[in-house]
């Protein structure tokens, strides 16, 4: 089948990134690989298969459905669910041998009941809301919940975590850390054998403190070779992009000066032009706001996208390209051609969004092609 748009995913780069991140952390710090949302659009099965060979300590996903996809690949790999479970999902915890996150009396009661029903102890990580205002027991109520958990022998509390709201704000993040650590200090839950204490994600690694009791990190974006937009990370790691995105130059046409392009007529040609039609649109992975802002690489050179992006086709201004430009050739929207490179984070900026969302908006129509380039 001829591909009209495809994402090339370099699994060797993923592994190199992982090693780079791990090497920059103290050896006692364990690596939780976050592979929610189809491994950030990279395709959960091939990504996870590679990560299983790469020395990660724990997989984290958003929900039971995602966990079940990993579980189908084999038993034994520990999988942590990061979000709140629906009551009907609880049975799957035991069936699939998953580790839930716990943040409320309601969840504790459900887990205890489940454990009694199946006569099986359930491991769980406690999520504390130290200032994110999302999932997690609010910090002022955390000690009370911990006391309740201690009364419940059916639950094996084996970790505690919190999540940062704005890692670029070092002061607020430090406060969140302090709130979280003070709860551990008062309850001493982390003194249990083999207890996981984690907070840091890709964006907060910058403020990771090697001396503290944090002994795990939860990494999503960075392992895929995309540096978070807000400031540098630990040691400014030179991670490599894992994903590149390409389409093809389907047609070229000449249009006279003064012609308006595409829906809404948001772009008018200022000169006689040669306009290329790229075989992908927002139905693939090119966000609507990229029209008139982003670029595509053709034959190693960048050319501007013009007019509004449509579902299946995007226009590119090739007026300045050599006259003999070939139809059918690759147009790169994310990735490298020769000496030119378009970073995913740049396309995200043009799309007025964040890299995480851009990765999640690569649709099913885009074939994922897996490579293991050594570079
Ligand atoms: C998604 C997520 C992460 C990973 O964040 P990145 O910024 O992609 O590294 C970590 N922790 C939680 C709770 C998450 O939901």
Image (cartoon, rainbow, N blue to C red):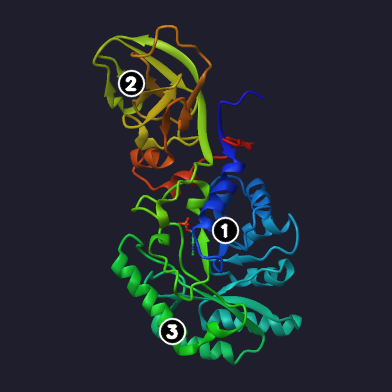
* Depth check, front residue: 132 or 361: 132
The Cα atoms of the two marked residues, 1 and 2, are separated by: 44 Å
Which residue shows up at 47% across the image and 26% down it? 337
Sequence-first tag of 3 and 2:
3
Query: Pointer 1: what residue?
Result: 33
Quadrant containing the N terminus in the rendered view: top right
Which residue shows up at 52% across the image and 62% down it? 218
- Are the residues flagged by discs 3 and 1 in contact, CB closer than 8 Å? no
The answer to whether residue 365 of the structure is visible from this angle is no
Q: Secondary structure at mark 1?
A: strand
Q: Where residue 261 is drawn, which disc sits there?
A: 2
The Cα atoms of the two marked residues, 3 and 2, are separated by: 59 Å
Point out residue 56 in the picture as x, y percentages from the top left corner.
62, 59
Point out residue 43 in the picture as x, y percentages from the top left corner.
61, 45
259 lies above or below 80: above
Q: Is residue 117 left or right of residue 236?
A: right
Mark 1 surroundings: few (<14), some (14-19) or many (≥20) residues within 10 A? many
Q: Where residue 183 is drawn, which disc sits there?
A: 3
- Are the residues flagged by discs 3 and 2 in contact, CB closer than 8 Å? no
């Amino acid at each position: 089948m001829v591909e009209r748009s495809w994402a090339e995913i370099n699994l060797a780069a993923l592994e190199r990134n992982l090693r780079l991140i791990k090497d920059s952390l103290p050896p006692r710090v364990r690596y939780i690989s976050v592979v929610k949302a189809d491994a950030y659009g990279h395709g959960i099965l091939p990504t996870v298969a590679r990560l299983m060979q790469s020395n990660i300590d724990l997989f984290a996903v958003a929900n039971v459905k995602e966990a079940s996809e990993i579980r189908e690949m084999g038993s034994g790999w520990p999988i942590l669910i990061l979000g709140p479970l629906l009551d009907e999902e609880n049975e799957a915890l035991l069936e699939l041998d998953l580790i839930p996150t716990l943040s409320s009396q309601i969840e504790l009661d459900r887990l205890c009941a489940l454990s009694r029903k199946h006569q099986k102890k359930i491991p769980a990580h406690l999520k504390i809301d130290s200032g994110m205002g999302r999932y997690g027991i609010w910090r002022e109520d955390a000690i009370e919940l911990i006391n309740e958990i201690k009364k419940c022998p059916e639950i094996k509390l084996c970790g505690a975590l919190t999540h940062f709201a704005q890692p670029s704000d070092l002061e607020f993040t430090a406060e969140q850390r302090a709130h979280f650590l003070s709860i551990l200090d008062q309850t001493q839950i982390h003194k249990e054998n083999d207890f996981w204490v984690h907070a840091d994600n890709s964006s907060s690694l910058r403020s990771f403190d090697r001396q503290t009791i944090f002994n795990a990190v939860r990494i999503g974006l960075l392992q895929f070779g995309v540096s978070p937009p807000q400031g540098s990370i630990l040691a400014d790691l030179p991670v490599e992009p894992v994903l590149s995105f390409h389409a093809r130059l389907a047609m070229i046409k000449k249009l006279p000066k003064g012609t308006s392009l595409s829906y809404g007529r948001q772009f008018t040609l200022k000169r006689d032009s040669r306009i290329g039609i790229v075989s992908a649109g927002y139905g693939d992975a090119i966000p609507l706001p990229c029209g008139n802002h982003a670029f595509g690489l053709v034959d190693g050179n960048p050319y501007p996208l013009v007019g509004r992006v449509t579902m299946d086709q995007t226009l590119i201004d090739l007026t300045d390209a050599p006259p003999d430009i070939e139809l059918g050739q690759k147009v790169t929207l994310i990735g490298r051609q020769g000496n030119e490179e378009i970073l995913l984070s740049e396309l995200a900026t043009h799309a007025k969004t964040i890299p995480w969302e851009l990765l999640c908006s690569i649709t099913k129509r885009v074939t994922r092609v897996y490579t293991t380039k050594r570079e």
